[in-house]
Image (cartoon, rainbow, N blue to C red):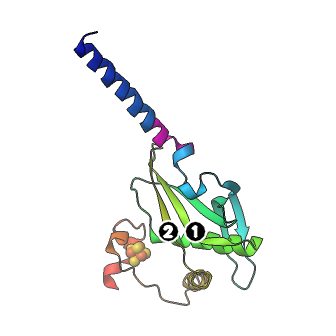
Amino acid sequence: MRLDALAVIAVGALAVILLWWWRSKSDPRQARLPPELRSAGLVYAERLFQSAGPVSISARVDRVYRNAAGVLVLVELKTRETNRTYQSDVIELSAQRVALMTHTGDVVADYAYIVTERPDGFRMGCHQVRLISHADVIFLAIRRGELFAGKVEPQSTCSSCLCRKCAFVRPCDPSSR
Ligand code: SF4
């Protein structure tokens, strides 16, 4: 067999291997979860939990897995154009943790995973985030209630990037604060 024919076969074989590798990496069933949870059992999916107490927290979890240490770990899938997380994601997951922990009495990890995916389904990343404490979630819930009741004055965010995309920018007028 001629040398150039062998080269064509080698390039073809390499292309097939690369295609197989790319497909296996982008298979959402295999690639979405962090390594810690790839063999973990799914415990809850799309389920609402509510904490008892003077300040009740209700939150719907996306996915909850039990890791090898027996601890529940929250996972949230976010469909967005950018491969990043926001502080609002952290607050949302922290509220889920409080609701889940107090409703079930189970130990829930103080970190969670956010899987980011583009609207076309392409998986972009998996981010581990540190959650805020139970006390801080209660503080935010109380402040939210007071804001809605008009008992406290809202403050503008220190991030002007948030204001640029905010639907309330006109009534809020952050430049006047
Ligand atoms: S426009 Fe007002 S409500 Fe919106 S992010 Fe900025 S400060 Fe917050």
Q: Quadrant of ligand 1?
A: bottom left
- Residue range highlighted in magenta: 23-29
**x and y, in percent, of residue 133 in the image:** 58, 81
Count neighbours of disc 1 (C-alpha within 10 A) and say few if under 14, some if 14 to 19, many if 20 or more: many
Q: Residue at x 56, y 85 (%)?
A: 143
**x and y, in percent, of residue 44 in the image:** 70, 58
Q: CA distance from mark 1 to mark 2?
A: 9 Å
For this rendering, which residue is in front, 40 or 132?
A: 40
For this rendering, which residue is in front, 97 or 23?
A: 23
**x and y, in percent, of residue 94 in the image:** 58, 73
Query: Where does label 2 land, which residue?
Result: 129
Residue type indicated by callout 1: Leu
Residue 122: name its quadrant. top left
For this rendering, which residue is in front, 91 or 38?
A: 38
Q: Residue at x 73, y 76 (%)?
A: 102
What is the residue that sits farthest to the top in this orientation?
1
Q: Residue at x 56, y 59 (%)?
A: 76
Q: Which mark is residue 93?
A: 1
Look at the numbered discs 1 and 2 and tell me whether their residues touch, using CB distance below 8 Å.
yes
